[in-house]
Image: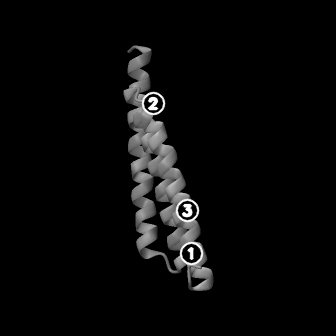
Amino acid sequence: MSTAGILDFSYSLGAVLVMLMIFLSLIRALAGPTAPDRVAAINIIGTKTLVIITLIARVYGQEYFLDIAMVYALMSFITTIGIAKYLEKGVLD
């Protein structure tokens, strides 16, 4: 097996494992006993999605996917901060 084949296999295996982790986090988000648990699980899902986008950029050699991943990370962070503020104060001022 060539080095490129081994790298492709490891990227594919990594993507599958990350998708499994996303599924487990989704279960936690649905069954979380408190709202902060759900927010943390949703934040984890956003982070793992970012990892998958980065793996896709690496496998296909498309560097503009990294720009998309960065925008997605910023949106995920701002959403998490907004939800945390809403849970703390009850209003988004």
Which residue does the numbered mark 1 point to in the structure image? Answer: 36
Viewed as shown, does residue 51 lie left or right of 13? right
Q: Residue furthest bottom?
A: 90
* Mark found first going from the N terminus, 1 or 3: 1
Q: Position of residue 17 (x, y in %)?
A: 43, 45
Q: Position of residue 15 (x, y in %)?
A: 41, 41
Q: Position of residue 12 (x, y in %)?
A: 38, 35
Q: Amino acid at mark 1?
A: Pro
The image quarter in which residue 21 lies: bottom left
Q: Residues within 10 Å of mark 2 (few under 14, many from 20)?
A: few
Quadrant into which the N terminus falls = top left
Label 2: element kind: loop
Quadrant into which the C terminus falls = bottom right
Q: Which mark is residue 28?
A: none
Q: Residue at x 54, y 73 (%)?
A: 83
Q: Residue furthest top?
A: 2
Q: Amino acid at mark 3?
A: Ile
Could you tell me if the residues under marks 3 and 2 are in contact, i.e. CB atoms within 8 Å?
Answer: no
Q: Is residue 78 above or below residue 68?
A: below
Q: Residues within 10 Å of mark 3 (few under 14, many from 20)?
A: few
Q: Residues within 10 Å of mark 1 (few under 14, many from 20)?
A: some
